[in-house]
Image: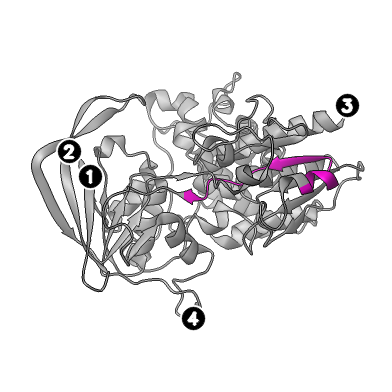
Amino acid sequence: MNMSLVKNPMPTQDPEKRSKNFDEVALGYTEEQAISEAQRCLNCKNMPCVSGCPVRVKIPFFIQKVANGEFEEAYRIITEDNLLPAVCGRVCPQETQCESKCIRAIKGESVGIGRLERFVADYHREHANESLTPPPANGKKVAVVGSGPSGLACAGYLAKKGYAVTVFEAMHLAGGVLSYGIPEFRLPKEIVKKEIANLKGLGVDFKTNVVIGKTLTVGEIKKEYDAVFIGSGAGLPSFMKIPGESANGVYSANEFLTRINLMKAYKNDSPTPIFHAKKTVVFGGGNVAMDAARSAKRLGADVTIVYRRTKAELPARKEEVEHAEEEGIKFEFLSAPLEIFSNADGWVYGVKCQKMELGEPDASGRRRPVPIDNSEYVIDADCVIVAIGTTPNPLIKNTTENLEINKRGGIVVEEETGKTSIDGVYAGGDAVTGAATVILAMGAGKTAGKAIDEYLSK
């Protein structure tokens, strides 16, 4: 057993080099590092870490296999509950989920569960030669709307049960936010393609360039399938509603990241244009804001993130904030944008901001930012990226009769099953909750998959 109070550090690219390329930042454990980290696990009998995992991976069991050098057996255990381990090992906020429950964290750092999951998935991808085959068909058909994390989790669960699953995706590539939202330096797209190939091996059929609500409606799909799962995500960007947001050089983070990630606009030979700014300002403090800022940095810009609370309140993962700081991205904390200035040609040239201080807690429990009088100042900028959140696209709700929607635009479901107000139609992920994490969306997809199986097995 390894009784070190700290995790084995994750090898990374040098900050100066990586801030100029889109190669993956974290390089992954070696076999020796993985075994050493796995030996820090106490193998607790009550397994508190599992309670923090939305898809309930049997964490101590797979970690013990890693400690013994049985990496393929570790992979088998993980994929009993999670069909996207290479993705989750990279982008899940383990520090607030499974690792937050780890007993080792009481005195020191938790076991590096996410790092070990990534290692196991990468080892399998590099060494296994297996070819997946579909299980025996059960004669039932299920349609899945959206190929993001919730849709993939639901599709995978049902495919393993013998259902004929068809996934409808609006974009030209499957993967949803995994393909268009998360940058290559955090989640290489070859990994997403491999995970999707695994689902195809189980018999899942992917139909791309199908916009549900335009190409087909949920009602039309329901006539051909025994059940439907809606996992269409939250792709409608929010804006600040301040003067100047319509100026040239202002992007939603959604558009900016989609051009870079899905269209490869950062490549010199890409047919999709992207503005290579000199000074970029990003509004927001979440993971999407970090992704946008770090992408803009790699395009050559001097980047500043404007956030109206303090560093302690940043919702982004600590690791992503640290990486951004290492790469030279500046932060303007306790500051709120008031106006975007543009020149006679309509192009951005600056952002007017105001200093803030934290007052009494708001409805979320966080202290509310309060403006400080006469504290306005201007940041020079020729590009602004708005990364303050997204909501579900209204297209499906506007074209689906009797689908109950809440005031935030999310689909209303039974929490235990994901069942909507329409019989045989289920939903989960960001289409229900608004923008959240990959693993929470996967948990919702898995929950709905179980409920669909029970519904169709009656």
Q: Earlier in the sequence, mark 4 or mark 1?
A: 4
Instruction: Name the residue type under label 3.
Output: Lys
Whole-Å distance between the Cαs marked 3 and 2?
58 Å
Whole-Å distance between the Cαs marked 1 and 2?
7 Å
> Could you say where residue 361 lies in the image, as x and y percent from the top left?
28, 24
Q: Residue at x 80, y 33 (%)?
A: 453
Secondary structure of the residue carrying numbered label 3: loop
Instruction: Name the residue type under label 4.
Output: Asp
Q: Which residue is mark 1?
A: 336
Quadrant in which the C terminus is drawn = top right
Q: Residue at x 31, y 27 (%)?
A: 366
In-image side of 117 versus 257 (left or right):
right
Q: Looking at the image, is 433 positioned above or below residue 250?
A: above
The verdict on residue 224 being magenta is: yes
Whole-Å distance between the Cαs marked 1 and 3?
55 Å
Q: Are marks 1 and 2 in contact (CB under 8 Å)?
A: yes
Q: Earlier in the sequence, mark 1 or mark 2?
A: 1
Q: Residue at x 36, y 26 (%)?
A: 364
The span shown in magenta is: 220-236
Q: Which residue is mark 4?
A: 269
Q: Which residue is mark 2?
A: 356
Whole-Å distance between the Cαs marked 2 and 4?
43 Å
